[in-house]
Image (spheres, grey):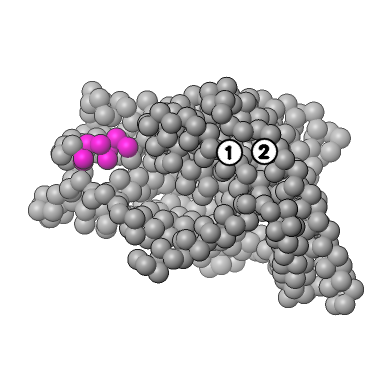
Amino acid sequence: MRSRRLAADNPARPAPALGGRSIARAGLIVTIGFLASRVLGWARLAVITNQFGASRDLDAFLAAFRIPDTLFQLVAAGAVGSALIPVVTELLGAGEEERAWRVVSTIFDLAVLVLVPLALVLAVAAPVLMPLITPTFAPAQAELVVQLTRVMLVSPIFLTLGATAGALLNALNSFGAPTLAPIAYNVAIIAAAILLAPTMGVTGVAAGVALGAVAHLGVQLPPLLGRGLRYRPVLDLRDAATRRILLLLAPRALGTGATQIVFLVNTMFATSLGTGALSVYTVAFTVLLIPVGILGVPLGVVLLPALSQAVVAGEMGRFAGVVGRALRQLFFVVAPATGLMFVFGRPIVAILFGHGDFTPHDVDLTAATLSVFLVGLGGHVLVAILAPAFFAFQDTRTPVAAALAAVAVDVAGAILLIGPLGLNGLALAIGLGAWVEAAILFGLLLRRVPGIELLGLGRSIVVFVAGAALASAVGLGAGLGVEALLGRHLNTLGLIVEVGLGGGLGVLAYAAWSVVFEVEELGEWIGLGRGLLGRERAG
């Protein structure tokens, strides 16, 4: 009762519009938090692989993680923010504070009413369901998967509530706690892997996933209460604002669900390839996601407001110019990143994961799988910036349709390629699916906005690819030189020197190439960095 009185004494007001300095500061907070979360996501997997290696226990944990993660991705994930933020912002801006809280309370309650029964049903059905995903596991390992699944089914409930709380705080222009939430989640899992796993085994890590989900919500509750949250049990599905949120959620949930099908199918196939195969696949895919998250996702976030403004103003020429410039900026960094990651794939994997029980043989298998995954890197990053171009038109159906096509390619490719290529077949299928999805989105975008200049883009890509080849050759030469000087079997420090020196010289060679060919994107990226630092100093 006291918390409700405090909330009533401090009602939420429409969040003030962010000024230029505030936007830069908020953007820096989100960017730092995003990078910290990515680093901790790597550290989480690194600590777990260090404890268990590519083993039966780790395979069981990763397989068990699939169902809880699928449940969360279907119900919430990024869809909650994209649906809740604009609706709640509009209600608060119109002075309808009581209605805004009622809508938020309805979403909270609906999430609980949907997720709790689903989690219970899945927990009961786990002995039947999980063998469908891991048909080749021995009885003891299959039983462990069921046990771990049941422990982690707590997580989607609290993660969904946390995602809803974070979306509400963002609508109130409060970004600190939502940025901290995934960090708390990862820290809890890392702590469990260090403190609980030695005595509880992989079950301790699963317990850490459940505790991390609770922490994800918990760190956001104090600022919500401080901003005047007035929660009450209610289920008002008649409210038009609630129905709008649910309608906005549906297409994103469908697209996310389609992607989860790929993960489930590939989990089933990977577990059929022997002990440790699923672990190797997951680690390689995690390394692939590092450049996707650093390059594609932030650029897509930055791109959406500018595209939306152009659509509202009816300036399709401006829209086409923004998209063309973004594509050139993207290819400018993706081309050398792909080449250098291909050259230094094994040292990178060894530095990040080659410790403890993750053996040199595991590193070799992971690096080989990563090299095939890199075929699709450009496609993955392209999707991350092409999808927002359709969101700017308030069109969520086209990206979903493209995602469904990619799923069909992924699954068909996995079926056809796993026999002759094993894990590399699964990785190649994922890459082909990414390029198909990117091609569909780009083709449909050209039909909608024909002003995107293709000839100049094509010429730029040729220059970028040639420069990336030069950077890769320089990096390879430098890496071989380090190995000749220090020996082929380098320790971690030697690997860091190899990647740092070789990668640094490769980047310098690429920059020199860009200067010779007067590549504008080099100056643009330098200007973006200077601008961000300058705005932050001014703030």
Asked whether 129 or 344 is in front, the reply is 344
Secondary-structure class at tag 1: helix
The image quadrant where one finds the C terminus is bottom left
Give the label on residue 193, or none: none
Q: Is residue 228 above or below residue 320?
A: below
Q: CA distance from mark 2 to mark 1?
A: 9 Å
Q: Are marks 2 and 1 in contact (CB under 8 Å)?
A: yes
What is the x, y in percent for residue 79?
43, 37
Task: Magenta stretch: give its range.
Answer: 86-93
- Identify the residue at the far right of this view: 484
Q: Nearer the viewer, residue 28 or 71?
A: 28
Looking at the image, residue 484 lies above or below residue 256: below
Classify residue 236 as left or right of residue 39: left
| Residue type (three-letter) at the residue carrying disc 2 | Gly
Residue 87 magenta-drawn? yes
The image shows residue 322 at horizontal and vertical percentages of 52, 40
Specify the amino acid type for callout 1.
Gly
Q: Residue at x 73, y 62 (%)?
A: 512
Residue 457: x and y in percent read 66, 38
- Residue 209 appears in the figure: yes
Image coordinates of residue 383 in percent, x first then y, are 59, 37
| Label 2 element class | helix
One can see residue 146 in this view: no
Which residue is identified by label 1? 324
How many marks the image carries: the answer is 2
Say which mark, if any, is on residue 456.
2
Residue 427, picture quadrant: top right
Residue at the image position 69 percent from the left and 34 percent from the top: 455
Q: Main secondary structure of the magenta part?
A: helix
User: At x 47% / y 47%, what residue is drawn?
Assistant: 302
Quarter of image, res 472: bottom right
